[in-house]
Every structure is written in C-alpha cells, then in structure tokens.
Image (spheres, grey):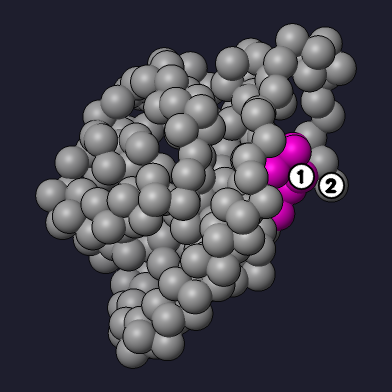
Amino acid sequence: MSIAIDSKVVREGAFAVKPKHVSYAFLKRAFDIAVSGALLLLLLPVFLVLAALVRMSSPGPVFYSADRVGLGGKRFKFIKFRSMYVDADRRRSELEAKNEKEGPIFKMKDDPRVTPIGRVLRRYSLDELPQIFSVLTGEMSMVGPRPPLPCEVEQYDAFAMRRLSVKPGITCYWQVMGRSDLTFEEWMELDNRYIDEMSFWNDCRLVLKTPLAVLRCDGAY
C-alpha cells in the first residue's frame, strides 16, 4: 500500500530530486548489502541478549512492528525491539496533551509507556538494530531520512514530502546532530540538505559518525 500523494504537491517539486549518477546508486546499494550483512553476522549474539532482556522485562512480543512510509510513499513493515508496554499505541491519545514537540510528531522525554529496559535500548539506539534486516532486503538504506508514520505524512507540506523521494535510512544528518533535541522543522531542513548533498562519500561519513553520536546519547529518548 502507498500513501496517496497529492498531484499538486508533486507538481510543486516535492519529488524533484536531481538524478544521481548510476554509479552512485550501484555503490549505495552495494554498500548497504555489505554493511548490513556484516553487521547482522557480528551482532547476532547482541540480538539474542537483547531479545532475552525484552522478553523478561515485560509481557509481550520481543519485536514491535508498525507501518512506516518509504520511498515514493510506499508503506513497509518497520521492526524494532519492543521498548514500550504492549498497550502503548492505545495510550498515545491519552498523552497527546503532553507532547513536547510541534508538528506531526510525538515525543516525550519521560514517556510512561516506555519499559525500564526500553529506556536503555532507546538511549543507545539498540531498539533500532532490527532495521538492519530492512537494509539488507532493500526497503531501507544505511543512510537516508528516517521513515515516518503514515499519520505524520498526511500532515506534510511539499517541503517535508520531498524526503519521501529517497529511500529511508537508519542514520541521517539529524541522527548525528542532536536527534530529538532538534525541532521537526530542523529535521526537515536537514533531510532536504541530505537529498541535495547525496554522495557515496557523504554516506560513508555519516555511517562513521553514527557510533560516536549514539554513545553521546544527545537527544536520545
């Protein structure tokens, strides 16, 4: 299923990304396969430990799966280690008044829906590790705008919609520059900047910067 994209938005340039050289597309996909494959092999013991911790921390499944919006508005299943209690989605409406962000996103530093082990997973982005599988299958890339929820995309203007013109990623500019400490508008500006500056070497640079950003825990909640 795909998100319905208004034709007027498209005409106004939401998807007007300059074509990149064929070699970049090839290198980007080859890089994604090589890095995601290597990480899955190296991190298998970590996956097993995290799965056990999530299972012991609270009743419910190890993984959390939800629809996200990817390239061209196409939906795909987005998988994370579960960091919230199983009734988290239902309880969100009860917490809307405590949303600490403007725009179509929802963020709380002390979200009561997050489990104790979930806070640790989120702090060090360990809950995001299963997305490496989505990189290997081609639904995501190592580098690209973070995939949004369908309800968020429904509120996008043309400037924000442009981020759907490239494959979503695990890391991006705002993931290494403040994460949730930044505003929604800053996220969109950085995602559009990435689209304008896309290159193989820029992708490599962002991947190398990500581990240090994760360890700093800036804006991680």
Label 1 Cα crowd, 10 Å radius (few <14 / some 14-19 / many 20+): some
**Which corner quadrant of the image does residue 162 belong to?**
top right
Q: Position of residue 18 (x, y in %)?
A: 65, 29
Find numbered disc 1 in the image and state the secondary structure of the residue it sits on.
Answer: loop
Q: Residue tagged by mark 2?
A: 1
Q: How many labels were placed on the picture? A: 2
Q: Badges 1 and 2: C-beta atoms under 8 Å apart?
A: yes
Label 2 Cα crowd, 10 Å radius (few <14 / some 14-19 / many 20+): few
Residue at x 63% of width, y 60% of height: 26
Queried whether the magenta region covers residue 188, the answer comes back as no
Q: Position of residue 193 (x, y in %)?
A: 44, 26
Q: Position of residue 159 (x, y in %)?
A: 59, 16
**Which corner quadrant of the image does residue 55 belong to?**
bottom left
Find numbered disc 2 in the image and state the secondary structure of the residue it sits on.
Answer: loop
Instruction: Tell me the kind of residue under disc 1.
Output: Lys
Tell me where the magenta segment starts and ends, as one range.
67-76
Q: Residue tagged by mark 1?
A: 74
The vertical placement of 149 against 58, above or below, is above
Q: Decide which of 84, 87 is in the foreground and name it.
A: 84
Instruction: Tell me the kind of residue under disc 2.
Output: Met
The vertical placement of 142 against 155, above or below, is below
In this image, 114 relative to 165: left or right?
left
Residue at x 67% of width, y 51% of height: 22
Residue 181 shows in this picture: yes
